[in-house]
Amino acid sequence: MSIRLLIFLLIACCGMQGTKAFTMPGGGISSLVNKPTTHCTAPLSKLAMVRFDPTLEKWVPTAPEDEVGYGPMGTLLRAGPKPFLIRVLNPDNYEQGVFKFMYNENMSRMEAQGNFDAYLENPNDWAYQYFKEKNGGFKKDYVNDGMDPQSLILKGVWSSLVFALAMRGIYCYNTGEYFYEFLKLSSD
């Protein structure tokens, strides 16, 4: 029974990969990082933190401190596994996306990373929050959101439970044991 459940979940996850509802609009991450947009909504400072190099066709930082942000574990803790995997598996496009956020929105590296991670996690929610902010609504702090000790402990507990269940599933799959066998009362 647990093998059927694992196969069903695998097929369901693969099926979601083919739907348009769970993909990024406009062709994915590569559409976010190519050439600069012509409709910049934020006023740019004279000391831009990044610039677009037409010869390299890439965004490049203008100062070494613009290359420093939080690491991949910070992405995992702030936004979850989806942006973390995108960041680890495609680091160049991730960096280009962050640099483009820095340029277009005139924000710091940390703030751009937080916004880009939130966008990668759920573009629709990020866009909703973005337009709320532009209309004078609540400005969400993507850099510090969920980084308080209570949230970190909660994330650790939940992730250890999910990890334990995944390990139990793998063990049961390899040994042929029933997934819920450990719940049965022994009648010795």
Image (spheres, rainbow, N blue to C red):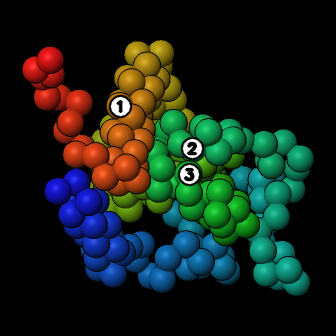
- Foreground pick, 63 / 72: 72
Which quadrant would the C terminus be assigned to in this image? top left
At 77% across and 53% down in the image, what residue appears?
A: 49
Give the foreground label among 3 and 1: 1
Mark 3 Cα shell of 10 Å, populated few (<14), some (14-19), many (≥20): many
Q: Amino acid at mark 2?
A: Thr
Q: Is residue 9 above or below residue 186?
A: below
What separation in Å lies between label 2 and label 3 (alpha carbons)?
Answer: 6 Å
- Foreground pick, 185 / 159: 185
Marked residue nearer the N-terminal end (3 or 1): 3
Query: Along the horizontal axis of the image, is 170 left or right of 58?
Result: left
**Number of marks present in the image shown:** 3
Res. 56 mark: none
Query: Along the horizontal axis of the image, is 182 left or right of 103?
Result: left
Tell me, yes or no, whether the two marked residues, 2 and 3, touch with CB atoms within 8 Å.
yes
Marked residue nearer the N-terminal end (2 or 3): 2
- Rendering coords of residue 64 (x, y %): 89, 47
**What residue does disc 1 label?**
161
- Foreground pick, 94 / 14: 14
Residue at the farthest front position: 188
At 40% across and 53% down in the image, what residue appears?
A: 174
- Rendering coords of residue 14 (x, y %): 34, 73
Mark 2 Cα shell of 10 Å, populated few (<14), some (14-19), many (≥20): many
Q: Is residue 110 above or below residue 175?
A: above
What separation in Å lies between label 3 and label 1 (alpha carbons)?
Answer: 20 Å
**What residue does disc 2 label?**
75
**SS for dot 3:** helix
At 72% across and 53% down in the image, what residue appears?
A: 45
Query: Along the horizontal axis of the image, is 119 left or right of 88?
Result: left
Q: Does the image show residue 140?
A: no
Q: Is residue 8 above or below residue 126?
A: below
